[in-house]
Amino acid sequence: MTIVMLIISMLLFFVLFFGIGFILNMLLRMSWVMAVIYPIVVIFIVDKVRFIEYFTNTGYAFKQLGTNFANLAPADLLILSSGLAGAIVAGIVIKLLRKNGYQMF
């Protein structure tokens, strides 16, 4: 992955999760909803185990999840962390807008 692709991917993840987080925060009136949901989204992105395996074969599923997280490339970690930053910034922006008197929905 080139540095240009990395920067564009980081920007896209930031904007994507900022936008989704902003809309969810605005509609649900909970400032940190996307920051709480984001780790679940990351697990679905990284994990290759079926969701039902977490209930039927818990030890194996979590072991695979840990292995998959340990094997992530630094570029993947940067991209995923920029998505988390976008979700957190969305919560901060909603809080600031509400503090300044803007009533969204």
Image (spheres, rainbow, N blue to C red):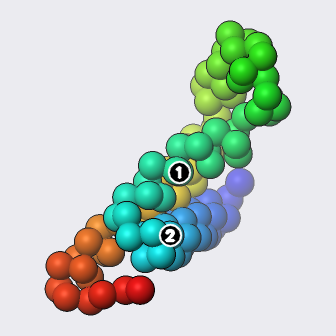
| SS assignment at label 2 | helix
Observer able to see residue 73: yes
Q: Which residue is outermost to the left? A: 100
| SS assignment at label 1 | helix
The answer to the question of whether label 1 and label 2 lie on touching residues, with beta carbons closer than 8 A, is no
Left or right: where 57 falls relative to 20? right
Q: Which residue is outermost to the bottom? A: 102
Image coordinates for residue 26, horizontal then vertical, percent: 43, 76
Quarter of the image containing the C terminus? bottom left
Give me the C-alpha separation between circle 1 and circle 2.
12 Å
Query: Which mark, residue 24?
Result: 2
> Upstream in the sequence, badge 1 or badge 2?
2
Left or right: where 94 falls relative to 50? left
Residue at 37 percent of width and 86 percent of height: 104
Residue type of the residue flagged with mark 1: Tyr
Q: Between residues 39 and 10, which one lies in front from this camera angle? A: 39
Residue at 70 percent of width and 43 percent of height: 44
Mark 1 or mark 2, which is nearer to you?
2
Observer able to see residue 67: no
Q: In the picture shown, does residue 78 fall above or below 15?
A: above
Query: Which mark, residue 38?
Result: 1
Quarter of the image containing the N terminus? bottom right
Q: Residues within 10 Å of mark 2 (few under 14, many from 20)?
A: some
Query: Which mark, residue 8?
Result: none
Image coordinates for residue 6, horizontal then vertical, percent: 61, 60
Residue type of the residue flagged with mark 2: Leu
Residue at 45 percent of width and 69 percent of height: 28
Image coordinates for residue 83, horizontal then vertical, percent: 52, 58
Image coordinates for residue 75, horizontal then vertical, percent: 60, 47
